[in-house]
Amino acid sequence: MTRVIHDSGEGVQKEALDLVSSDVNFPKGHFPDYRIGPNNQIIDPEEAHEAVPLKEIVAKETAQLLEQHKRLSVRDLKEKFEKGLSGATKLSEEAKRREAASLDRQVLLKKLRDVLDTLKGRVAGRNRDDAEEAISLVEALAVQLTQREGELIYEKAEVKKLANFLKQATEDARKVAEEERALALAEIEKARAAIEKVEKALQVHDSASSSREKEEIEELRKEVREARRIKMLHQPSKVMDMEFELKALRTLISEKTQLCNQLKKELAMIKRLEEDSSDLFELEGSDTLGSQLCIIPRVDGGPNITNCPIQWYRVISGGTRELISGATKFTYAPEPFDVGRLLQAEIVLNTDKIIVQTDGPIENAAGLERYVDSLMKRTDIEFNVVVTQMNGKDYSSNSVHVFHIGKLRIKLRKGWSTKARESYSTTMKLCGSRGGGNAAARAVFWQARKGLTYTLAFETDRDRNAAIMIARKFASNCNVALTGPGDQGT
């Protein structure tokens, strides 16, 4: 007698699940929710949101590399190839992971189909139809996985090819970069060697040209001497050539004299600095007639003496100082009366008195005495001047006047109009301008008589000094000491 037992579907399903769970570890407690897409393909909803397929990514990267190949440098191309190689390695690893996952899915589907076959033999009716439908879905899923596995194998092969290609390209790029670097270094060394050769050639050329120029100058000098000698032999008079040579020699002697005076001044200054380093000020200017002395600080940032009381003195023999009346500025232009004497400037800074002195006695200007002698041979000694001040006030007109120095009188005229005419007397004063200024070396102070004074600017400092010397000689012939205000006559 057969005994029939009616079991519910829930119990059978529970038993089947228990059998399956003993071999397979499902991440969920139910079958995957697959759906059929176009061309009867089974689509997993969890994989619907995956990234672009590997083949498309590889094709896109390859196209970008080919497009940029022409406009990339060797170094950039090498970097791109290295990046592509690392990307291909990552893609190969991802393909391996997918292959392992596909193998796990094949094993899982096989076990699932075995379980469903076992379940199909144990159930009947509607549950049997569900089991058959599940088996068909599992078989379709297995077919789909097989197709995917084939595609993955093909993609894996393509990725391996691309990786090998990128590796070879990277090696080639590295070799090309090293070759280009070696070529660049060789070119740089060649350029350096060429530059050194050019520099040596330039140095040799400069030395040769300088020696050649010296030889040419010596030859020109010899030719000039020979030409002068021939000219002197063929000309009826040699006096003119001798005068030219004498003039050139005088000019050369005057230049050498100025240079010698400057060197003497520098030596004296160095000695003073060695003896006393506490001096704050010094005199700037040459110790010769025609120059202009100026008090300057010895070091930068020295005290300002613009508003400090200043007085200039001339040192007479024996160390006696004679005050120069009106010389109270920080600049002073020596006059002929100062020749052969030291000049001192006394500065009152706060409560201290600072004295600066010339390095040596004031020397006469080169050629001045000959110039004065030549002027005294003339009948009329006249100089062109400009009146800058009259009776201590600025003169409005800048027109040129004529300063006439005679043996008995001095006259100032403008055209045919006489401005002043006075004979030599004790009330007449004539000296260099003592009011400072940039043109002090070319200006004189002339007191024609009491109540009438002029400040005259000459064309040159030589004319100014010559006029003072000539006037004093003519006044001395008249037994009059023509000096400046407050000066002692000698």
Image (spheres, rainbow, N blue to C red):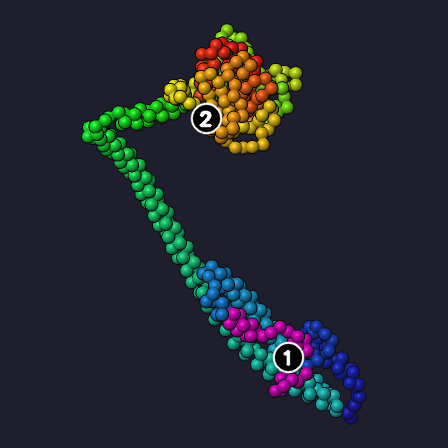
Tell me what residue is drawn at x 44 percent, y 65 percent.
168
Boundaries of the magenta span? 35-64
Q: What number is the disc on residue 109?
A: 1
Quadrant, the N terminus? bottom right
Q: Is residue 431 left or right of residue 244?
A: right
Q: Position of residue 225 (x, y in %)?
A: 24, 30
Q: Amino acid at mark 2?
A: Phe
Q: Nearer the viewer, mark 2 or mark 1?
A: 2
Q: Position of residue 410 (x, y in %)?
A: 49, 20
Q: Amino acid at mark 1?
A: Leu
Q: CA distance from mark 2 to mark 1?
A: 131 Å
Depth check: give the residue in front, 215 or 407.
407
Q: Position of residue 170 (x, y in %)?
A: 46, 63
Q: Is residue 328 above or below residue 490?
A: below
Q: Is residue 83 left or right of residue 363?
A: right
Instruction: Kindly indicate whether the residue at mark 1 contacts the one at mark 2 (C-beta within 8 angstroms).
Output: no
**Of pointers 2 and 1, the one earlier in the residue sequence:** 1
Q: Residue furthest front?
A: 416
Q: Is residue 106 magenta?
A: no
> Mark 2 — residue?
383
Depth check: give the residue in front, 123 or 49.
49
At mark 1, the secondary structure is helix
Depth check: give the residue in front, 481 or 187.
481
Q: Is residue 41 magenta?
A: yes
Q: Is residue 135 above or below residue 258?
A: below
Corner quadrant of residue 233: top left
Corner quadrant of residue 254: top left
Q: Position of residue 451 (x, y in %)?
A: 60, 19
Q: What number is the disc on residue 65?
A: none
